Amino acid sequence: MMLCALALLTLVPVITGDNAGVKVSITQRGLDYAVTNTIKQVLLKMDIPDHFGTIQVLWINFDYSFTGMKIHFDNFKSEQKFVSGTGVSIAVQITNLNVSGYVTLGRNRTFELFVTTLSISATVAVKSDRNGHPILNMNEDNCLPEIGQFKPQIGNRRSINWILRKITSLFNGFVRTLLKNQICNKLQTLLADLNTQLKTLKAKVSEYTEIDYSLRSPVVSDNSIEMGLKGVFYNTQQRVEPPSSPPAFSLASQNTNMFYIAVSAFTINSAFMVLHKTNVFNIRITDDMVPSVSPIRLSTTTFGAFIPQIFETHPDLKLELKVETVKEPIIKFEPNHVILQLLSTVTAYDVQSGNTPTQLFVLNLESVASVQVSVEEGDLAFNLTLEKIEGSMNGKPFKVKKNHFLTMIMHNIVFPIIKAHLAKGFQPPGLLGSYIGKVHIINPQVKVLNDYVLIGTDIEFEENTSSLHH
């Protein structure tokens, strides 16, 4: 997820006029975890190709080869610090870097282990491109791996030990150079991939909807990196900017968890705007959608309880309803309180009298729901509870009680559809998932503040550690 994507950064301040709809903050705990696991995976994923050659000993030529070489290590230590206004300093030290594999010398083939030390220091700068967007850059001078001389761990094969020592110098020649280049090249490749994703990072929600998570404005302090993400939903068929920009908001200082994600009301409301315009909240409701155990059926008899003239002119007819949003729903965040406002119409059709449905009446509804925000399987989830409905027909208001048929429709049919679409829309942004492994959110805590909801969480990479010793 995006939370751990920038853990290797040393930041040059970036100024942008765009406010963020979503913010992500990495604390010292998060930085330690992300840097450690990223560097470990960079090392473990390095490839040492098979190497073949000929060596002359006492005027005799011996063919040799190094094959099936694998990297292992233990005693891994890393230290990373936030530098306010600048970025992050990183130092890695491995006292036992092991490369094992098969050494063939003439007709002799043995499994050998070569041991050395490794230290890495690297700084990655964030600069602005021509459009003012941040890009990640690491010069060769800012990537400094230091690898000691490999020493063979020799057993009791005294007959070839002296030759093995001789070809160890050849092993040092090609492996040390190879690893030095690969460490920096792997980091450069990772940064290049991140640059591409940072500019165009989008999460597809549905066939017609996506959210833009591109990076806006990273800021570094003494104890965290805070990143602003655009956080705007768009229609994939017709990209239209929202009529307003997200209001500026600041994250309260937090350091208990590894990472914090703040999602603004603006971001969620931009989702509602797209969903409203793509008509996903327009719902056709028939009587067979009403639970069979319900004593209330979709008919003029039911509606006659509060619209007597309907029952008088159309007694005991089966109905079909069409629910449509008049405008996009609006969500509001206040400290420890979330409400959703929904303006809709309910059009009733007679589907019994003829082949063509006949419109009978139109109801105007204003619904208010309280919202419980949580994290379910790594995604932001919204549980809606209907608080009240105010209705009118032809300009005349009518009361809608809690046990009313319209209440059942909103609570059991309309709200679950809204919840399902919101659940699709708030999957965390992902960058390193394909490189490190799947990211699991651990013990998330949700806090509702003014104009945004804050999620504090630890994370865990689902990585391959079969050859990794801590």
Image: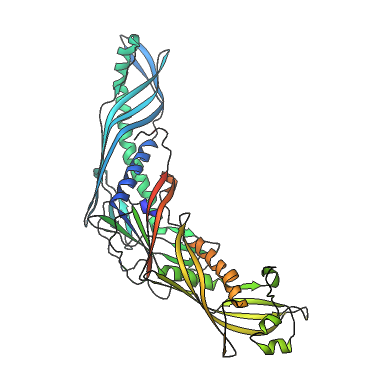
Rendering coords of residue 378 (x, y %)? 45, 55
Q: Quadrant of the C terminus?
A: top left
Q: Is residue 231 left or right of residue 424?
A: left
Q: Which image quadrant for residue 157?
A: top left
Name the residue nearer the viewer: 249 or 43: 249
Residue at the spot 38% in from the left edge and 36% down from the top edge: 44
Rendering coords of residue 358 (x, y %)? 72, 82
Colour scheme used in the picture?
rainbow
Q: Is residue 453 above or below residue 34?
A: below
Q: Across the whole image, how many numbered discs are drawn on residues?
A: 0
Q: Is residue 379 above or below residue 122?
A: below
Rendering coords of residue 308 (x, y %)? 67, 88
Q: Which image quadrant for residue 300?
A: bottom right
> Is residue 279 in view from this perspective?
no
Name the residue nearer the viewer: 202 or 97: 97
Q: Which image quadrant for residue 279?
A: bottom right
Residue at the spot 60% in from the left edge and 73% down from the top edge: 408
Name the residue nearer the viewer: 440 or 49: 440
Q: Is residue 308 left or right of residue 218?
A: right
Q: Residue furthest right?
A: 354
> Is residue 94 in view from this perspective?
yes
Rendering coords of residue 100 (x, y %)? 37, 25
Residue at the spot 61% in from the left edge and 80% down from the top edge: 346
Q: Is residue 159 left or right of residue 312?
A: left
